[in-house]
Image: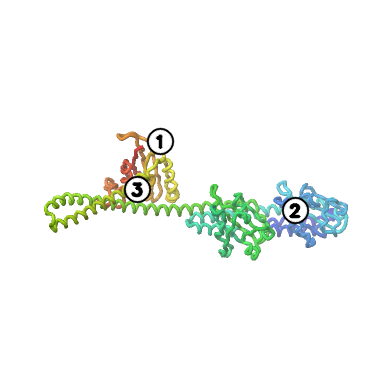
Amino acid sequence: MSITGNSNPVVDALYRISKLAGDVEDSGEALGAILDEIVDVFNAATASISLVNYRTRRLEIEASRGLPEHCLDLQLHLGEGVTGWVALHGEPLLVEDVTKEPRYFPANHSIRSELAAPMEEAGQVIGVVSVDSVKPGCFTEDDQKLLILLAAEASRVVGRIWHLQQLKTKAAQLQSLVNAGEKLVSKMETETVILGIAEEACHFTGCHMSAIYTFDNQEKRLRLNVAMDRDGTIDLEEELSLRDSSLGYAVQNMRQIEVFDLPKTEEHHLVFYTQEVGLSSMLVTPLIHGEQIIGVLTVYTLAPHRFTNDERNVFQTLARMGAIAIQNARLYRRVFETESTLRQSEKMNTLGLLVAEIAHEIRNPLTVIKLLFEPLEESFEEGNECKEDLRVIKDRLDQLEDIVSRVLDFGRASQTAYSEIDFDQLVDDTHRLLRLKLEQARIDWTYEPVQSGQKFHAHRGQIQQVLLNLSLNAIEAMPYGGRILLQAKQVDDSTGKVLQVTFTDSGKGVPEDVQSQIFDSFLSRGIKGTGLGLSIIKRILREHYGDIELVSSKSGETIFRFWLPL
């Protein structure tokens, strides 16, 4: 048709197309309405709007009118056919007779003339509007100008709808990530964290199902931990080697893998389930913490879907958050297990100290008894029954002394367990054990070595227990957070060079009336609330020819100082 003469239909069409930007939120619905207006204006036999998929470099038909069924799935490469040429060059093309046009792709043999114009946004071709006629020479240059005008308005409308959709999608994704973060941070059990990740993943727009496989680094296998759709968990079990599927490829290469058409690929995971449900597309995202692969997060869609860069980034962010949460949950478990072991060890040490002190207290009166007993043996002649009774009593006294000696010897640390210790490394290892507990308690730990590389000969486990006991006492004294400062330096005293360590915390302090008694054992005092294990600390240090003292203590600052010979 020509736009000369009566232009009201053109103006009306432009107005209705422009109005779609505020009335319609779905781009597919908008494209269909735009195409209806274009068909009415040109009285076209067939028409289509094809959009460019820049990932595949192809044109995909998004809306059509009058096209045969076999043409609807047609995808042209950029530069292929009339529409492909228009998309590649960004210029309109008027073909008066398609039989004489080598660029025409013969998809519909009834068509004789074609007119196509590019859709552009921000200087980039996003698609092509094409109208066809069964008559040759049906379209004019004026029609071409009109189609360019309508295509430009269609591009503006579709672009605005896309931007609104992207904003809404990003807002929903951001809210989902915030919700996921809040949930994951509060979880301490590994299985609960994994369940939370899967639950959040399958609620993202378009996702029907999610699954998490954890990676066994020793066996080099992936094990299905949880599978979930929007109705809840799915009872599935599976183990995969890294060669079996795209999941293993994602682990080996530590990057996302997308499968667009699951039924047409040689995927070997959850085959029966994916076929039964009809899952079409999949995105696999590795769960990575530092350089360590924890597993993979997979999401599935029912309809064929190409994941956008924004969607990929969202799942990468969720996977990173999930990996951190899983690792933290595992570390929390190890910390609590370690703390439980330390507490048990402390109880055993305390019991050992109790036994040693009992043995020591028994030895003193036993020695006196033996000294008084020896003259009694001379008071009776051989053959006297009392003489035999005294012999039996002497054997029992010797047996008691032997038992006491064995108990005391057992309580002493074996010299074979001693080794050369790097104090900086020991402090670092201790901090690693306590790191999550310190973070949970909001306590800042600082170590200030005056001279690095201080080494000494000692029992590593016992010296570490000194640091752990002091730290645990400090954490208990700072329920609302605070700081711990360790300062180490080499000093000279009367015995030679020693490592002097100052341990400062900002806790509530030791009550003044018990400060002089905090290193006493519970046998001689009975003080409560001054911190566990201080008597054990003192005993350990003295066995290493060192010692500890309370320098000062008040609300907001308590300072202990201990030293060990170098």
Vertical placement of 502 versus 217: above or below? above
Residue located at (54% from left, 47% from top): 290
**Direction from residue 554 to residue 132 in the image, left or right:** right
Q: In which quarter of the image is residue 208?
A: bottom right
Pointer 1: residues within 10 angstroms few (<14), some, or many (20+)?
Answer: few
Q: Which of marks 2 and 3 is nearer the N terminus?
A: 2
Amino acid type at mark 1:
Val
| Figure colour scheme | rainbow
- According to the picture, the residue beneath numbered tag 3 turns out to be 508
Mark 1 to mark 3: distance in Å?
27 Å
- According to the picture, the residue beneath numbered tag 1 turns out to be 450
| Of residues 162 and 392, the one drawn nearer to the viewer in this rendering | 392
The disc at residue 339 is none
Residue 340, visible in the rendered structure: yes
| Of residues 368 and 389, the one drawn nearer to the viewer in this rendering | 389
**Direction from residue 2 to residue 204 in the image, left or right:** left
Q: Where is residue 92 in the image (x, y as percent from the top left)?
A: 80, 49
The reply to whether the C-beta atoms of the residues labelled 2 and 1 are less than 8 Å apart is no
Q: Position of residue 453 (x, y in %)?
A: 42, 37
Q: Is mark 2 on a helix, strand or loop?
A: strand
Q: Which of marks 2 and 1 is nearer the N terminus?
A: 2
Q: Where is residue 295 in the image (x, y as percent from the top left)?
A: 56, 54
Amino acid type at mark 3:
Lys
Residue located at (65% from left, 54% from top): 258
- According to the picture, the residue beneath numbered tag 2 turns out to be 59
Residue 12, visible in the rendered structure: no
The reply to whether the C-beta atoms of the residues labelled 1 and 3 are less than 8 Å apart is no
The reply to whether the C-beta atoms of the residues labelled 2 and 3 are less than 8 Å apart is no
Q: Position of residue 216 (x, y in %)?
A: 54, 54
Q: Nearer the viewer, mark 2 or mark 1?
A: 1
